[in-house]
Amino acid sequence: MHTLRDIHVRYFVVTYYLKQDGQYDEAVQVVSSLGKVISRTANVILDFKKQEVVKARMEQPIERDWTLIRDYYSKIYTQIIGELEKQFPPASGASTEKS
């Protein structure tokens, strides 16, 4: 089994799916490049190489604040974000909150 350390990935991608019961299901993936399908269907795309928000949208656009969105997902997906930041260390002054 490969870990993120074995594979050079760049993007953290979150897609929300509306279930029949009206609740959302969250799917997360890390990819090295963005294809048309991911770019079109994903709700949140974080580029860890450039440390920027490529896309942030639910039913309405979300503010493209790197630190705010990165910190939110880091609390939920600590290991994945940590591995991405080992490949692309945060810029000086960027948040690395681990609470």
Image (cartoon, helix red, strand yellow):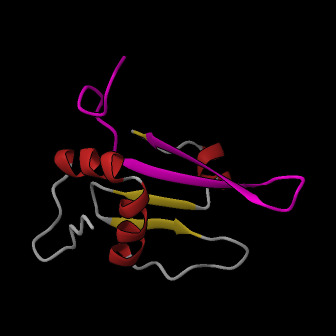
Is 93 or 50 nearer to us in this picture? 93
- In the displayed structure, 91 sits above or below 79; it is below
Where residue 89 appears, as percent x and y from the top left, is 15, 56
Name the outermost residue toward the bottom: 63
Q: Residue furthest right?
A: 20
Q: Residue furthest front?
A: 99
- Left or right of residue 38: residue 11: left
18 in the magenta segment: yes
In this view of the protein, which residue sits in the foreground, 36 or 84?
84
Q: Could you say which is closer to the camera, residue 86 or residue 99?
A: 99
Residue 38 on the magenta span: no
93 vs 37, left or right, is left
Choose top left, top right, bottom left or bottom right for residue 90.
bottom left
Farthest top residue? 1
**Magenta stretch?**
1-30
For the image, the number of numbered tags is 0
User: Which quadrant: the N terminus?
Assistant: top left
Foreground pick, 49 / 82: 82
**Left or right of 78, for residue 44:** right
Image position, residue 22 (x, y; %): 85, 62
Q: Residue at x 34, y 39 (%)?
A: 9
Residue 58, placed above or below residue 84: below
Task: Say which residue appears at 27% left-offset and 68% top-offset.
Answer: 99
Residue at the image position 36 percent from the left and 73 percent from the top: 66
